[in-house]
Image (cartoon, rainbow, N blue to C red):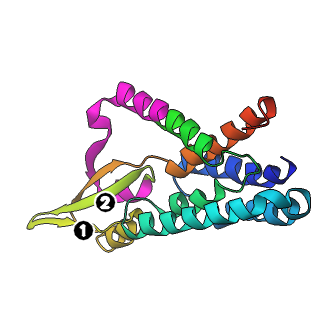
Amino acid sequence: MIADLPVCISMAVIAYQDFKSRLVDDWAFLPSLAFYPIAFPLYPHVLTSVVIKASIMCLAGVLIYKAGLAAQADAIVLPLLTFSTGALSPLPAFVVAGIAGSGHLLYVLLKHGLKGLNRTVSIEEALREDKWIPKKVILEGGEEQLPLPPEKAWDKLREYEGEEARVLVSFGAPLAGYFAIGYLGYFLLRLFVPYI
């Protein structure tokens, strides 16, 4: 479990940044890279399975990002979930992430109702508030659908800056934050039940 500590540092930073601003800095992933140098001498028996699982999750992350279903940080955090010496990794992390995500989205729904998930705002407001993902620009002459993933939608939206238009935005769930909480929850669970 010592090798998992640098990943926990990364996950704590990722969760904080994703929940706070929906933007995760690239440096937040760096501490997790210490997993392999620490795990190699201490846990050589688990490295083969970790590499295989990380490769599968990396491929899944790339496909999810290319399909526009998640932002870059959400896709990058997927292989990090496998950087664990736990036998069941990453399945328990996904379960905890699902519980955390469901709880957060239920809170948003109870607080704001269904109207809290989508709304129409000015371009300036859409660019200012990172928790909203722009879906389409509504102009006087019609509408233009914005591309996926969210990073491309933000870039396209900046082209309309200064114009009289409205933007349909939807709530951006902090998926990387949910996954990070899942990893941290799995790590804490393993303190009490080490064989999972």
Q: Which residue is mark 2?
A: 123
User: Residue at image x 43%, y 68%?
Assistant: 63
Q: Cβ–Cβ below 8 Å for labels 2 and 1?
A: yes
> Is residue 179 shown above or below 190?
below
* Circle 1 SS class: loop
Where does residue 23 sit, x and y in percent of width and height?
54, 57
Where does residue 132 sit, x and y in percent of width and height?
38, 51
- Asked if residue 24 can be seen in this view, the reply is no
Q: Which residue is mark 1?
A: 163
Does 176 sit left or right of 129 as displayed?
Answer: right
Q: Gap in Å between the C-alphas at discs 2 and 1? A: 8 Å
Choose between 49 and 98: the one closer to the eye.
49
Does 143 sit left or right of 100 as displayed?
Answer: left
Which residues are drawn in magenta? 102-128
* Circle 2 SS class: helix
Residue projecting furthest to the right: 41
| Residue type highlighted by circle 1 | Glu
Residue projecting furthest to the top: 110
